[in-house]
């Protein structure tokens, strides 16, 4: 049984899972014909915030808006990435 993991481990799993899930979503949008299954698997929910401005006297910048597109396939990608990482490490 493994001990507690560092936050970077979980962040890496999230990033890898969302990338794989995003690629699967794009693949399903191209490969599947127009149907209820395609709509179910490829529909996304978007969370966004911004723009965020920072004025540090010497430099100022604006970041945003930043958004996260979440679909069922991206959540499946996160789950698969976690299972693979757990079995390897």
Image (tube, grey):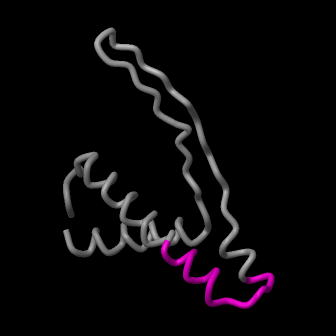
Residue 72 higher or lower than 8, as above or below:
below
Spot occupied by residue 14 in the image (x, y as percentages of width and height):
40, 58
Spot occupied by residue 41 in the image (x, y as percentages of width and height):
66, 75
- Outermost residue on the top side: it is 57
Relative side of 75 to 59, left or right: right
How many numbered marks are there? 0
In front of the other: 85 or 39: 39
User: Which quadrant of the rendered structure holds the C terminus?
Assistant: bottom left
Relative side of 79 to 3, left or right: right
In front of the other: 21 or 13: 21
Spot occupied by residue 19 in the image (x, y as percentages of width and height):
43, 66
In front of the other: 33 or 12: 33
Q: Is residue 58 magenta?
A: no
Relative side of 45 to 56, left or right: right
Residue 2 higher or lower than 73, as above or below:
above
Q: Is residue 31 magenta?
A: yes
Residue sitting at x 37%, y 70% = 81
**Quadrant of residue 51 within the rendered picture:** top right
Q: Which residues are magenta?
A: 23-37
Provide the major secondary structure of the magenta segment.
Answer: helix
**Quadrant of residue 45 within the rendered picture:** bottom right
Residue sitting at x 34%, y 13% = 56
In front of the other: 59 or 6: 59
Relative side of 43 to 89, left or right: right
Residue sitting at x 53%, y 65% = 75
Residue sitting at x 21%, y 64% = 1
Residue 26 higher or lower than 78, as above or below:
below
Spot occupied by residue 40 in the image (x, y as percentages of width and height):
73, 74
């Amino acid at each position: 049984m493994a001990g507690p993991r560092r936050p970077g481990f979980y962040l890496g799993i999230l990033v890898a899972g969302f990338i794989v899930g995003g690629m699967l979503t794009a693949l399903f949008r191209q490969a599947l014909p127009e149907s209820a299954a395609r709509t179910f698997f490829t529909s996304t929910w978007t969370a966004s915030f911004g723009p965020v401005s920072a004025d540090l006297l010497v430099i100022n910048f604006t970041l945003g808006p930043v958004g996260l597109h979440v679909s069922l396939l991206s959540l499946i990608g996160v789950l698969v990435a976690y299972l693979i990482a757990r079995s390897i490490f």
